[in-house]
Image (cartoon, grey):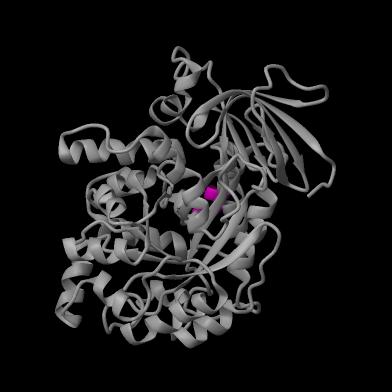
Amino acid sequence: MTATPRTYWLEHAWLGTHVEPGVALDVRDGRIRAVHPGTPAPPPGAEVLRGLTLPGLANAHSHAFHRALRSTVQVGSGTFWTWREIMYATADRLTPDTYHALARAVYAEMALAGITTVGEFHYVHHAPGGMPYADPNAMGEALLEAAAEAGIRITLLDTAYLSSGFGQPPTTHQLRFSDGDADAWARRCSALREREHARIGAAVHSVRAVPADQLATVAGWAEEREAPLHVHLSEQTAENDACQEIHGCTPAQLLALHGVLGPRTTGVHNTHLTAEDIALIGGSGTGTCMCPTTERDLADGIGPAAALQNEGSPLSLGSDSHAVIDLLEEARAMELNERLRTRSRGHWTAAALLRAATADGHAALGWDDAGTIEAGARADLTTLALDSVRTAGPLPRLGAETAVFAATAADVRHTIVAGRHVVRDGAHTRVPDVPGALAQAVAALRA
């Protein structure tokens, strides 16, 4: 991070409630020190950002290695469970070096899409067969270093994944995910250290993957550190049915019984919920991360996002399996999915959808001081072109609507993290050939 003061002039800026033309930002030490609306021309020496500038986007749910599955899983038919077998086969081929190379390229792709922070739901901890590496956190360190090299922030959500199902030991594929028990998981991830660009959080993979009597250990670890805690929740009806059979309650109810729900917790997907579940999640302040492009790709279903938010659950967005890396598409899809489900329009304003992709997504990842354009916030910015074939035409004051309902990741012109260009004029400043890096990293996993 540089201490050199900088001034950015934003041709149009989304300030949370509206689009303001002509905004100057004073930036120092990676933070916005002052916001000057009503600045019709660039001040002398200012860096000019033409187009619409948003706060940096937060990708609240990522499995970086799933990027290697893109397109290859679209051959033939199947279900979530058949897709999972292909995913496991890819996980088997990861090493710290190949994971670093892939994640670096994936995080660079995210930067090109305007994402400044990623929440990495990380469970590939050990070597195939479950033997720890010499550094038990070699895989997690590879991800932390990959994010640094790609120039984005990361919250590493170190994931407890201990069983294949309720009362079932890990399968051969899952042995490298498991630490044996939650106490061993806690000892390992306690050795991870935060740094300027990185925070450490926790995750319960799912109620089927962490025995009920060990849920409190994971929740307690996160509570002690005031760290984010994420959990895959009710993504599949099979999980709900098995939980009812074994525990006599829904997954959400089981998590509540063991102290997992609460304001620092985010349920990912939250797809197949009862009315009681929705009230329980919202009433506890537990967040909801929707991943619409993955949920539709895997035929998971459409979750009750609007009902959850109405009950008090903050919404965030993630690209999850990376069938698509485009937070604007995730925001658009959440609204359009709800339109399909209800056959009515206008469940969220464009501003509300952008908040899910920015401030609320950052909050879900423990970066409460990011995701807004205001004094004191981290100087993380994403600038969209307003003159592409997708965005040309609408009035600039409709910038929020244009961003959500017309723009795509291809319209990202600049991405700035901590006041520094990571993407300038559509090109990554640290990873010169992102497509080449992606192709090489994926090919290495197929060799």
Answer yes or no: is residue 439 visible. Answer: no
- Horizontal relation, residue 4 to residue 338: left or right: right
**Residue extent of the magenta highlight:** 440-447
Prevailing SS of the magenta stretch? helix
Relative to 409, is 57 above or below?
Answer: below
Instruction: Tell me where residue 114 appears, x and y as whole percent.
Output: 56, 38
- Horizontal relation, residue 276 to residue 75: left or right: left
Relative to 203, is 375 above or below?
Answer: above
Instruction: Tell me where residue 437 appears, x and y as whole percent.
Output: 61, 43
Instruction: Tell me where residue 5 appears, x and y as whole percent.
Output: 82, 39
Residue 443 is one of the magenta-drawn residues = yes
Q: Residue furthest top?
A: 393
Q: Residue at x 50, y 81 (%)?
A: 185
- Horizontal relation, residue 223 to residue 144: left or right: left
Q: Residue at x 28, y 50 (%)?
A: 305
Instruction: Tell me where residue 62 appears, x and y as whole percent.
Output: 47, 54
Q: Nearer the viewer, residue 71 or 118?
A: 118
Write down the quadrant of residue 173 in the picture. Answer: bottom left
Q: Residue at x 52, y 58 (%)?
A: 365
Residue 66 is one of the magenta-drawn residues = no
- Horizontal relation, residue 249 to residue 335: left or right: left
Q: Nearer the viewer, residue 440 or 145?
A: 145
Write down the quadrant of residue 267 in the picture. Answer: bottom left
Relative to 323, is 446 above or below?
Answer: below
Q: Nearer the viewer, residue 308 or 88?
A: 308
